[in-house]
Image (cartoon, helix red, strand yellow):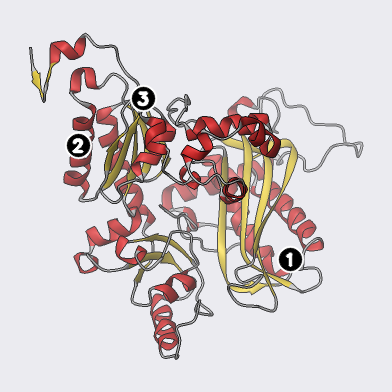
Amino acid sequence: MVETGNYLQAELWRQPARRWIFHVDMDAFFASVEQHDNPDLAGKPVIVANSPLPMEKVREMVAEARKLHHMPEFIKGIRGVVASASYEARVFGVRSAMPLAKALSLCPDALVTPGRFGRYREVAEHLRRIWGDFSPLIEPMSLDEAYIDMTGVELSGGPIRDIGVRLKARIRDETGLTASVGIASSKLVAKIASDLQKPDGLVVVPHGEEAAVLAPLPVRTVPGIGPRTADALQAMGIFTCGHLARANQAVLSAHFGAEHAASLVQRALGVDHSPVEPPGDPKSVSRETTLVEDKRTVADLRHIVRGLADHVAWSLREDGLSARCVYIKLRLLPMRRQGPGRTGGFGRLITRQLTLPMPTDSANVVFDMAIKLLDAAARTTGLASGSEVVRLVGVGAANLVHTADLVGQFPGQDGYVEPPDDGSAPEPKAAPERDRRLSAGIDDIRRKFGYHAITSAAGANVRLKDDEGLVDG
């Protein structure tokens, strides 16, 4: 028999395997990588953000703003979004996905560094190798966050908390970073637990104690309960998970519908049977960019959309996928600013989508559909009257299928039959054979020399940074 902590291994082997789920969440991942790689940043407020302006200019604008009698609510002219903030910056209220202008008004002494997403991917791959040494069942949620199914591991590895300690130690020893780990019988409770003692936390919720642990927590703590649902619950006098778990089902059903009401109560009790699912094919592919200067018309955006569509189509072809849906995303701001804290301070985000008659991986088709969507959006928003301008534009493809499964649907494939040219064929048509040969040639060049080695003339000035718009927790 092998002694393992306070357990005898033979005793453990006689026990039934209990379901244990780990939720691993790296602490301020991007910012922590920067602090690890540059010791001069250690212990200082660090913001990771990509801005259209040079960082020297950003710092100059912050310095000018600090000369004012009162620090403004946001610093006009500074664009970009916080991708990550160190815990030293978070104490000032800085959060991921916050406009950089707002973050610097809250913490003007913050050190802003551009994101190095290739480096973050390198560290993330190392993390996944570590996680894989503990379990083969891993469901990544982002570069720095994952669910790990550890069911049965304690039968050979000892008490579940000890396994969590060993996992955290491996991460620290091999990457120099800290992780917060929640351990529970379900994904939902494990995720909540990982956030209870951040940073560098380890929380185990024993089987049968899920409802008791959740009871004092605010309802907003529960994944899936957003601000609107939380406001509606609070209007009913329901502020904590305990209140929600004891709420009158009939009253909840009258407000949210029977199915949603039942789901809310189950989540408040910590009941979640969803499995840990290793990743499959991507559900969508998209690219977006925050504009250095606001754009007012479709014509102004055309070359930018061309570059985005080209990048999306390239990603589809690299993954062997085609898309049945194309969509665009726009952040619109009022032409006349009213300032933050009042309507229209940071604008509004809208999306428009279109389902294709035939899946595509063609940049020309993605571009044509994106422009149609952009035209339609312009007619129904303030772009038509000149009352709104565009700050951010994105192009995406969704409802993806494997191109190899589309036998006979593209020119050049076995079994393809050219449709009759009677004017009844739906638009857009599949990319012609010449288009496909050209795309294949471009793809070969990019694989050898990098994406920016060749691009269309229309999109030549659209140079996107890797993972522009990515944020961590």
Q: Secondary structure at mark 3?
A: loop
Looking at the image, residue 176 sits to the left or right of residue 331; the answer is: left
- The spot of residue 71 in percent (x, y) is 45, 83
Looking at the image, residue 280 sits to the left or right of residue 149; the answer is: right
Label 3 is placed on what type of residue?
Gly
Mark yes or no: residue 19 visible: yes
Mark 2 or mark 1: name the one nearer the start of the chain: 2
Q: Residue at x 56, y 40 (%)?
A: 317
Image quadrant containing the N terminus: top left
Looking at the image, residue 207 sits to the left or right of residue 405; the answer is: left
Mark 2 or mark 3: name the one nearer the start of the chain: 2
Viewer-proximal residue among 139 and 299 = 139
Viewer-proximal residue among 318 and 291 = 291
Q: Is residue 315 positioned above or below 186 on the image?
A: below
Residue where numbered disc 3 is placed: 208
Residue where numbered disc 1 is placed: 298
Residue where numbered disc 2 is placed: 165
Looking at the image, residue 246 sits to the left or right of residue 136; the answer is: right
- The spot of residue 231 in percent (x, y) is 59, 51
